[in-house]
Amino acid sequence: MLTNNEDLHVSQVTGEKELTRMLAKLRLRSDLEANAKGVTEDIVDGFSDAEVSALPESTIVHIVDAYFILEKKGVPDEEIFKKIDLQRSLIGENTTVPADINLSQYIKWRLKVEFPQITSLEEMIVDMEILYAVKWFSRTSKRTRDWADADAFAAKAVSATREKHQNAQVMIEAKETLVKASSGKWKYLIAGLVIVLAVGAVVCWAFFMDGLKLF
């Protein structure tokens, strides 16, 4: 798949950790806000295995992996999600798996539970990551080798998300410019008013002094 800096071919990934890293790179490639803070896709290469396991992409990969294992055993989706949730739930966590959901919906729900502090997870990017993970695990189980649709969707998702961030930044800069311009206008108006008052005060003082001289 062609994106900004280098080709990221998810289809050529050989292990789950590598898959997790590559999905994280794709997410960061689209996140201009994170890039502006120095968090770029290149930083993922330096992550330890423990840091990779703490990424949202690790949650996606593990859930898709578990789903395929249980589905292959004939376990119904409802039971699959309950079993996965039992494994992933933290001690003291008080959550209930929503009813009548599919794999994508369950993953998105689980991401909100596990990463409530992350507000920059764009739904389109999450959809891309889920699609790639499903394709990858389907490939290893020899269900399909067709990556064209996943690559096309990924290119669209990354491009659309970057454009969204760019437009948001343009709006922020436009507002800041407007505020500065407004502040400047008020500054000049206030300065003008001060000058007028000062001149008026001088004139009044002059008249006052002249009045004193008359008496």
Image: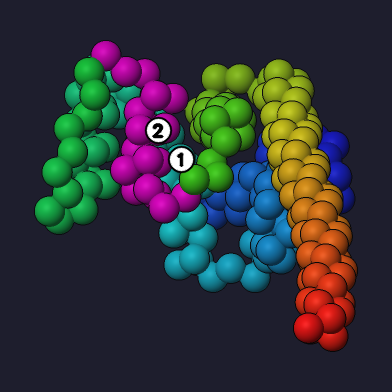
Q: Looking at the picture, tell me which residue is in the foreground, 193 or 113.
A: 193
Give the secondary structure at mark 1: helix
The residue at 83%/66% (across/down) is 200
Residue tagged by mark 2? Answer: 107
Tell me which amino acid carries mark 1.
Ile
Q: In this view, does 63 lie above or below 77?
A: below
Residue 60 in magenta? no
Q: Which residue is drawn at 70% across and 23% down?
A: 153
Q: Mark 1 near mark 2, Cβ–Cβ under 8 Å?
A: yes
Q: Where is residue 202 in the image (x, y as percent from the top left)?
A: 85, 75
Q: Where is residue 55 in the image (x, y as percent from the top left)?
A: 49, 55
Residue 175: quarter of image: top right
Give the quarter of the figure containing the C terminus.
Answer: bottom right
Q: Is residue 164 left or right of residue 65?
A: right
Residue 107 magenta: yes
Mark 1 Cα-neighbour bin, 10 Å: few <14, some 14–19, many ≥20: many
* Residue 34 visible within the image: yes
Residue 60 badge: 1
Type of the residue with mark 2: Ile
Query: Magenta residues?
Result: 100-118
Taking the spot 70% from the left edge, 29% from the top edge, the residue there is 157
Residue at disc 2, secondary structure: helix
